[in-house]
Image (cartoon, helix red, strand yellow):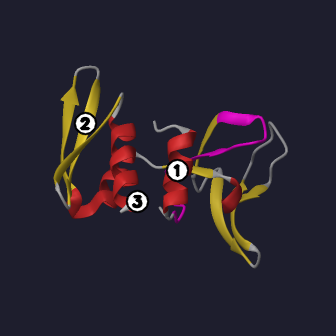
Amino acid sequence: MITIDLALRLRTAGLEWTPASGDRFVIPGRDMDADVFVVSELTIDVHDAPTGRLLRFNGTTEWALDSVEQDAVVWLPSEGQLRAALGPRFRRLEPIGDGYAVVITAPGGEERHLDVDAERAYARALLSVLST
């Protein structure tokens, strides 16, 4: 899973998110940074309110959180979502020692982006693409 820092950097770089079932997110700054939530029609659904998009918590009795604005959460895109966002620039994923490299096409040729797991390597490659 990518880190909150990488997810925030992706958001700042312009990666847009339309919440969908199965998407993971965290709610930073509320002593819940380590809790990963998953959008699911059964427990967390997406509601378009006049004030903006809300992620509503249904049937949650453990703690009092009815909904949270989308801007207050940080999306943790999955490996597949990151790969799809790279589009035709993605070339391949390579195992490298104890980690992975994502190879993309760049104006100067191929670039390799390394990290300890595939999702983080994809995120680093996407950051490079979004920054150009």
Residue 9: give its label: 1
Q: Mark 3 to mark 2: distance in Å? A: 19 Å
Residue occupied by mark 2 = 101
Per the image, label 1 sits on a secondary structure element best described as helix
Quarter-of-image position of residue 118: top left
Q: Quadrant of the N terminus?
A: top left
Determine whether, in the image, residue 59 is placed left or right of residue 90: right
- Nearest to the observer: residue 45 or residue 75: 75
Work out whether 46 lies above or below 2: below
Name which residue type carries label 3.
Ser
Work out whether 57 lies above or below 98: below
Name which residue type carries label 2.
Ala
Residue 131: give its label: 3
- Nearest to the observer: residue 58 or residue 1: 1
- Measured from the top left, where is residue 66 in percent x and y? 80, 54
Q: Mark 1 to mark 2: distance in Å? A: 19 Å
Stretch of the chain drawn in magenta = 17-34
Task: Reply yes or no: does residue 32 show up in magenta.
Answer: yes
